[in-house]
Amino acid sequence: RKKSTCFSDWKHAYERLHVHKTSLGHKNGVLKIKKRRQAEARIDSKLLEQLEDERKYCAISSHKRVIKRKKRDDEYREGEVLSLERDHFRINIFFPICDQLLDKLRMRKTSYDAVTSNFAFLCKLDTMSEADKTPKVIPD
């Protein structure tokens, strides 16, 4: 018959467990397990630190409101570098010239509107009757 290697002294099991708990081997084993559970002793400790940093950053940055203002074609922000000379020409030369041209054309239109309102009747002189011409030419 084979001899069993299992524990069979159940009458003295409590004393044996108490001896095992207080033994140096058991204490060292428990300390090793606790140390392995700590984040610093793990192989992926740097990864865990990076993950925690990202969680903190996301918690802070997700609550911030980003204010954006629509940028016009002829302006750029301070410190912004223009990537192409074409962009520099377009923003700093072409668009300002177009703006000035539009302003001058609007001024010219308002002055022509004033002249037209005063002298538009001259274009219709050949179709107007004599009675209609007199009050227009000689106002009261």
Image (cartoon, helix red, strand yellow):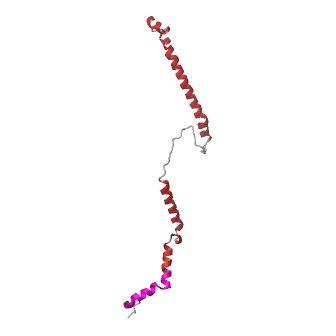
Range covered by the magenta-colored residues = 5-28
Give residue 62's position: percent from left, percent from top: 47, 53
Considering only vertical position in the picture, is 13 above or below 99?
below
Considering only vertical position in the picture, is 128 above or below 29?
above
Please name the residue shown 42% across and 88% down the image: 16
Q: Nearer the viewer, residue 7 or 10?
A: 10
Please say whether residue 40 is visible from this viewpoint. Answer: yes
Please name the residue shown 53% across and 72% down the image: 41
Work out which residue is located at the far bottom of the displayed protein and give it: 1
Q: Answer with the quarter of the image where residue 74 lies.
A: top right
Work out which residue is located at the far top of the displayed protein and give it: 130
Q: Answer with the quarter of the image where residue 132 lies.
A: top left
- Does the stretch in magenta take in 43? no
Considering only vertical position in the picture, is 121 above or below 83?
above
Q: Nearer the viewer, residue 63 or 82?
A: 63
Give residue 64's position: percent from left, percent from top: 49, 51
Considering only vertical position in the picture, is 26 above or below 42?
below
Give residue 24's position: percent from left, percent from top: 50, 84
Q: Main secondary structure of the magenta part?
A: helix
Please name the residue shown 50% across and 71% down the image: 38
Q: Looking at the rendering, in which quadrant would you find the N terminus?
A: bottom left
Q: Nearer the viewer, residue 86 or 110?
A: 110
User: Does 60 sit left or right of 97 as displayed?
Assistant: left
Please say whether residue 6 is visible from this viewpoint. Answer: no
Give residue 98's position: percent from left, percent from top: 57, 31
Count of residue discs: 0
Work out which residue is located at the far right of the displayed protein and give it: 85
